[in-house]
Amino acid sequence: MLEYLFANKNVEKILMYLCMHGKTNATELSRCFDSALDPIQKTLRKLEAGGLLASFLEGRTRVFQWNPRCPFLEEIQALAKKAYNFLPPDIQEARYQPNKRKRPRKTGKPL
C-alpha cells in the first residue's frame, strides 16, 4: 500500500515494523520478511541519511530506531500505523507481532 508512495516495498515494511517494535536491525528484518539482507541494509542506510531513522551499536550489531529529531516523525508513524491496520490479520500476526524468541534458551533452564 505505501510502497507506491515511497517507491520501495522495503520502506513500507521497515516503517510498519518499527511502529510495532520500536527498534530493529537489518538481519532481524531480513529474517522476518524472508528477503535478502543487502536491499534491507541499503534501505535502512537511506532512511538514516534522510533523517527519519537513527542508529547505534549494540555490541557489533547496528540497531535502527526512529529519529526523535525528525520534524515529520509523528505524521509518518501515524501513516505507518494506519497502513498496518489495513493489513490482513494473518499477515499482521506472521510478520509484525513480537512473539519469537531472539536468543536461544539457556542450556539446562527448566521450561
Image: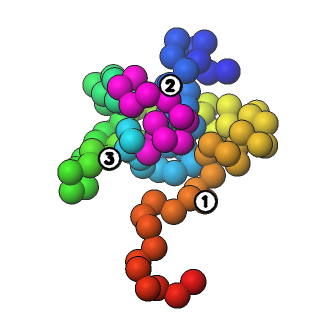
Residue with the mark numbered 2: 10
Q: Secondary structure at mark 3?
A: strand
69 or 14, nearer to the observer: 14
Kindly identify the residue that appears in the image at 44 percent across and 28 percent down.
36
Q: Are marks 2 and 3 in contact (CB under 8 Å)?
A: no
- Quadrant of residue 103 in the image? bottom left
- Foreground disc of the pair 3, 1: 1
**What amino acid type is highlighted by mark number 1?**
Asn
Say if the magenta span includes residue 34: yes
Rendered image: mark on residue 63: 3
Q: Label 2 vs label 3: CA separation?
A: 17 Å
State whether the magenta stretch is mostly helix, strand or loop: helix
Quarter placement of the C terminus: bottom right
Element type where label 1 sits in the image: loop
Instruction: Identify the residue at horizontal 57%, vertical 48% (top origin).
Output: 20
Crowding around mark 2 (Cα neighbors within 10 Å: few <14, some 14 to 19, many 20+) is many
User: Which stretch is magenta?
Assistant: 28-39
Query: What label sits on residue 99 in the rendered view?
Result: 1
Label 3 and label 1: CA atoms lie apart by: 19 Å
Rendered-image quadrant of the N terminus: top right
Q: At which x and y percent is residue 92?
A: 70, 43
Q: Residue at x 68, y 31 (%)?
A: 83
Disc on the earlier residue, 1 or 2: 2
